[in-house]
Amino acid sequence: MMTVGSMLRSARIARKLSIEDVEKATRIRKKFLTAIEADDFTSIPSPAYAKGFIRNYSDFVGLDQSRVLAFFRRQTMEAPKSTLLPKGMAEPLNASVIRLTPGRFLMLVILGFAAAFIAYFGLQVRRIQHPPVLSVESPADGIIISDRRIDVLGRTDPDATVSVNGIGILVRSDGKFFDQVSLEPGSNLITISSTSRFGKSVTETLTVTVMPQ
């Protein structure tokens, strides 16, 4: 079956281009190009970035970007459907082990609400007292590169706000964030901060060195 990845890969190979050639011409990182060719769009920060990458890649290898994007939309909209259910859900149980009386049912409901309230209260106390989680996936601290731009990817609490070198960036509903930072030759500091809605902050500072070309 023809897919976005197979179309782009075939066009690249037909033009006798390597992934590195495409990376250099389009400024799209190799790992994203490889993910696109494998139809692994979950490795790309967001659908908007995926569409932009696919447009640039399609133009570079001489494909009609609107046709390739149509395949992308069809691929990402189709969800696999399973017709199998666990045996306990597909077939009625033969007999009830414990007889559920109205009194027991009411007690279970009360205990359920109590447990949910305690868990919610404990979570709110933790959020107030502790800074948000901040996990920087890329770049690695101390990395040495030759490019003048670098992608910053990571994860934090969904309701936190994130800034990179003092500039606020978008945090997705699942807590992931993405930004691209311009660099100067030599040593560069990238400061990433995450602040909870209660004002608690956590910061990571990374060093990235750009080798002069």
Image (cartoon, grey):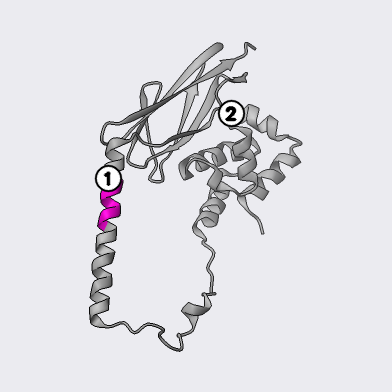
Q: Which residue is mark 1?
A: 124
Secondary structure mostly seen in the magenta stretch: helix
Decide which of 19, 208 is in the foreground and name it. Answer: 208
Task: Give the residue type at disc 1.
Answer: Gln
The residue positioned 48% from the left and 45% from the top of the image is 47
Question: x and y percent of residue 82 in the render?
Answer: 54, 70
The residue positioned 48% from the left and 27% from the top of the image is 180
Q: Is residue 29 magenta?
A: no
In the drawing, does residue 213 fall left or right of residue 113? Answer: right
The residue positioned 65% from the left and 41% from the top of the image is 34
- In the image, which disc is placed on residue 27? 2
In the drawing, does residue 176 fall left or right of residue 5? Answer: left
Decide which of 179, 10 is in the foreground and name it. Answer: 179
Q: Where does the magenta region start and end?
A: 117-124
Image quadrant in which the N terminus is located: bottom right
Q: How many marks?
A: 2
> Is the residue under label 2 in contact with that under label 1 (CB below 8 Å)?
no
Location of residue 108 by image quarter: bottom left
In the drawing, does residue 170 fall left or right of residue 11? Answer: left
Q: Secondary structure at mark 1?
A: helix
Can residue 148 be seen in this snapshot?
yes
Location of residue 209 by image quarter: top right
Q: Secondary structure at mark 2?
A: loop
In the drawing, does residue 126 fall left or right of residue 27? Answer: left
Task: Give the residue type at disc 2.
Answer: Arg
User: Mark 1 and mark 2: span between their CA atoms?
Assistant: 43 Å
- Image height of 73 relative to 43, above or below: below
Question: x and y percent of residue 150 in the render?
Answer: 54, 25
Image quadrant in which the C terminus is located: top right
Q: Earlier in the sequence, mark 1 or mark 2?
A: 2
- In the image, which disc is placed on residue 57? none
Decide which of 107, 71 is in the foreground and name it. Answer: 107
